[in-house]
Image (spheres, rainbow, N blue to C red):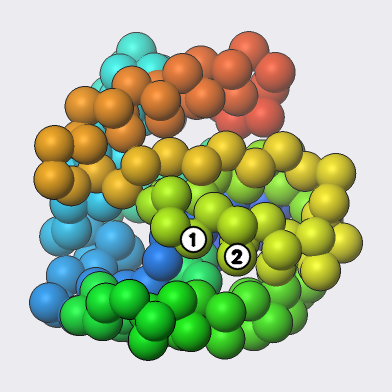
Amino acid sequence: MQDLRERYRPSRLSLLFVGESPPIGGTFFYAGNSNLFNYTQQAFAQAIGTTVGHGRAFLDYFRRVGCYLEDLCVEPVNQLRGAPRRAMHRDGILPLSKRLSTWQDAPHAVLVVGKSVGGSVAVAADAAGWGHVPVFVLPFPAMSHQERYMSELSGILVQAVRASWISGKAT
């Protein structure tokens, strides 16, 4: 999975998305086969107003405009509940801050996907020297939160285009 993720790492980072972890079920954002991928692509299409592509074409667009998805935890945690899951979140803070520190420049914004990891991601971003970067916490697009995720993400993306953080052109 890490090789696939690295294939889509942009040279310049504009918006960093941070999720909880890769899912245990075999789906993966960068494989183009997860709910997060589908609803993120739809939100981009709504916000940008033109086709941003599907599948690999969307992943290429996502990279081209400086977007990247990282995870707080590198191993799946969605099968865990309660204290063990929260412990994994805490244990993921330092490694995430080290991965964030590998970027030459901080992004314009960090978009956290999943309210349960918002605090941990903010601590990691601060530890990486990104305390000045705004952090937006979005609901994970599942269990009836899909429309809210797309609506909130679309609003942020419209702002990002207006501020020239990302291009409003799909091609």
Residue tagged by mark 1? 117
Q: Tag on residue 38?
A: none
- Spatial CA distance of label 1 from label 2 is 5 Å
Amino acid on which the number 2 mark rests in the picture: Ser
- Disc 1 and disc 2 in contact, CB within 8 angstroms: yes
Residue tagged by mark 2? 120
Q: In this view, does 75 lie above or below 28?
A: below
Residue 136 locus on image (x, y percent)? 57, 38
Residue 158 locus on image (x, y percent)? 51, 16
Q: Which residue is depicted at the point 60% across and 57% down? A: 119
Residue 118 locus on image (x, y percent)? 54, 54
Q: How crowded is mark 2: few (under 14 residues within 10 Å), some or many (20 or more)?
A: many
| Residue 86 visible in the shown view | yes
Q: Which residue is depicted at the point 72% across and 47% down? A: 107
Q: How crowded is mark 1: few (under 14 residues within 10 Å), some or many (20 or more)?
A: many
Closer to us: 60 or 39: 39
Quadrant (top left/top right/bottom left/bottom right) for the C terminus = top left
Q: Is mark 1 on a helix, strand or loop?
A: helix
Q: In this view, does 25 lie above or below 35?
A: below
Q: Residue furthest front?
A: 83
